[in-house]
Amino acid sequence: NPPPVFNIPARKSSITIDGKLDRKEWGGLDVKNAMIIEDHHTGSRVKGAKSYAWLFYDRDYLYIGIRHEPDPYKNDMPPAMKNQVPSFEVAMESQQGAHSHGWWQYDMVTSGPVYSMDGNFRGEFKLNNLFGMPEEKAKGFTESVEYKADVQDEENRTWTSEIKIPISKIGINPEEVE
């Protein structure tokens, strides 16, 4: 399956990164306008809880708000699943540019760098440095991102999260994107 393509609208209202999805901030939280995350990174459909992501951008930032369906531990699950920390992964492809010189594989790949990030319901965020970004650059990227999670029901693993990513760190110029 080809990777999903999602058109991201410009932000129309201010967004406070507090982990709580406010209807006024996230376009009414209409699931018809959300990216539905229900596939494994291989493209195969995953049984279980889905996540809904709303994305917006402005001149400086990319904003992602995610609502995660309840995903409670069930008695027929392996015991290790009981202590699993719910998380998600977001991966996005960027444009080649000054932000990626010296670490992106220009000679092997004609696309821009791919950024893979994880967040969890404990409020922890990390960049998965899969392509050899220099350590200082990766640390600077991680420190520049605002991430918050809000757990509504820990037992049933119901939670929301918000991310604010500086566009300059991923090399996307909204004026150059169709």
Image (tube, rainbow, N blue to C red):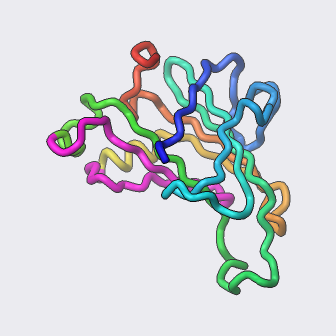
Q: Position of residue 21 (x, y in %)?
A: 77, 38
* Position in image of residue 163 (x %, y %): 60, 40
Residue at 54% across, 30% down: 62
Based on the picture, tell me whether residue 125 belongs to the magenta stretch.
yes
Residue placed furthest toward the top:
175
- Residue at position x 53%, y 47% from top? 90
Which residue is the extreme one toward the front? 1
Displayed quadrant of residue 64? top right
Q: Farthest left residue?
A: 107
Q: Which residues are magenta?
A: 107-135
Image coordinates for residue 102, horizontal then vertical, percent? 18, 41
- Seen in the image, is 118 located left or right of residue 155? left
- As for residue 99 lying within the magenta part, the answer is no
Identify the residue at horizontal 72%, vertical 53% (top origin).
50
Q: In the figure, 129 relative to 102: above or below? A: below
- The quarter holding residue 108 reads top left
Of 171 and 51, nearer the camera is 51
30 left or right of 118? right
Q: Is 137 located above or below residue 157 in the figure?
A: above
Please tell me which residue lies in front, 80 or 42: 42
Q: Is residue 94 above or below residue 125?
A: above
Counting every numbered tag in the picture gives 0
In terms of image quadrants, where is residue 14?
Answer: top right
Q: Residue 13: percent from the left, percent from the top?
A: 71, 19
